[in-house]
Amino acid sequence: MLIGPETFAARRARFLERLGGAAAVIPAAPLVTHHADVEYPFRQNSDFWYLTGFDEPDAVALFLPHCPENPFVLFVEPKDPTAEVWNGRRWGCEGAVERFGADLAHPRSELAQRLGDYLKGAEGIAFRVGRHPAVEPLVLQAWAGQLDRAPRSGTAALGLVAPCPLLHALRLRKGPEELERLREAARISAAAHELAREVVRPGLGERQVQAVIEQHFLEQGARGPAYGSIVAGGDNACVLHYTANSAELRDGDLLLIDAGCSLADYYNGDITRTFPVNGRFTGEQRALYELVLAAQEAAVAAVRPGATAEGVHDTAVRVLVEGLLELGLLVGDPGGIIERGAYRHLYMHRTGHWLGLDVHDVGAYRLGEHHVALEPGMVLTVEPGLYVSDRLPVPEGQPVIAERWKGIGIRIEDDVAVTERGHENLTAAALKAPAALER
């Protein structure tokens, strides 16, 4: 079930409270040109969506704690039958009030003339500079006007601040209704991975597998993929952001699939699974796969209230390094290898990221010298991997990689929610035990 208007209203109330005496200007996303006069499919700005649920381009939301009678104002494109014939329905000013809870709504064309008046009396202006070129000059002009009048009026906004820290702290902790949406995204994404594994065979094209996955997303009512699906056979899996998906799957190779759907209200899944194209691991493939799986399971187990994302990463790295020492792909003392980063030619990325309205969702990982403690409602991915190739030089003192290991790329990724008692693996329905991947 989509998130209802009462949830957006509650979010706005929390945001207004945190703003104190500052007024916030939060623009929607614009349409982005793909080529000539064709735009990319519209994707709303996540901060704007989080507070409004309004899914049209070029709108602007004002949050005005100093105007308690009208604290939420929307500027939107008005209804226009001719424009709607070409580009679809608009809610207009009436819909912005009746459907989306705005206290007042105006045509977007009136923002320049009205913004200064709305910002009068605010102690500061919360606006993200450098991201909204159509709105930024209007905000700066309104603020400059206040500063010019300050000697006579005695009041002006004291400064321009970023709304991101306040808003992103709210977005980091998901409410029950958001967790339900993430479970739905995880369910659809996991089922797509299972469907893909059923059809994979030598000679099939990577793009054909991508088609199976993304067809399932669309059939289940998702907007589509949350990011460019990665379907990487063999050595292609050693390219972390491989999205060409143009090669043929070869007998004896592994296939890495990193894919997740995005729902109608933008909540995302993000799953990676790796399995043998022909249904049987080789000895080297199984040894590395079981090591990555052990690291991933240990890292998932480390997710609990009071832990940190850094601690989850450290857990995975420790398991990987100790296992690589046993396999002879590293030599030396585990602690020294980790301290020097002498494993990074085989594992070069972090073990996870926040997940929510954005795939790499907002929220701090550390505040100054302190890592942010995990709390119930936070959701993160857990995705260790190993990538054995000649792309990065072997660190001094580490062994040359034997040919039998090269071209093996493995990543295992789940979406994990922090709960009161520990964690919930949202994507457990996508199988990963070696026995489940073989046929």
Image: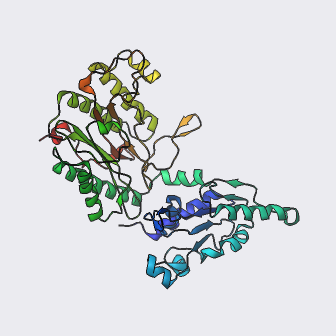
Q: Which residue is situated farthest in the right direction here?
A: 152
Lateral position of residue 150 relative to residue 187, left or right: right
Q: Which residue is situated farthest in the left direction here?
A: 439
Choose top left, top right, bottom left or bottom right for residue 121. Answer: bottom right
Figure check: 387 above or below 20: above
Near-viewer residue (408 or 434): 408
Residue 194 in the image: state x and y as whole percent: 21, 50
Q: Which residue is drawn at the image coordinates 50% and 73% (left, top)? A: 100
Figure check: 221 above or below 392: below
Figure check: 68 above or below 337: below
Q: Which residue is drawn at the image coordinates 36% and 38% (left, top)? A: 239
Residue 97 in the image: state x and y as whole percent: 54, 77
Lateral position of residue 289 relative to residue 270, left or right: left
Lateral position of residue 43 relative to residue 128, left or right: left
Choose top left, top right, bottom left or bottom right for residue 78. Answer: bottom right
Q: Which residue is drawn at the image coordinates 39% and 46% (left, top)? A: 420
Near-viewer residue (388 or 39): 39
Coloring applied to the structure:
rainbow
Figure check: 292 above or below 28: above
Q: How many marks?
A: 0
Q: Is residue 186 visible?
A: yes
Residue 369 in the image: state x and y as whole percent: 58, 34
Query: Which quadrant holds the C terminus?
Result: top left
Residue 318 in the image: state x and y as whole percent: 37, 26
Q: Is residue 105 visible?
A: no
Query: Which quadrant holds the N terminus?
Result: bottom left
Near-viewer residue (317 or 409): 409
Q: Which residue is situated farthest in the front direction here?
A: 36
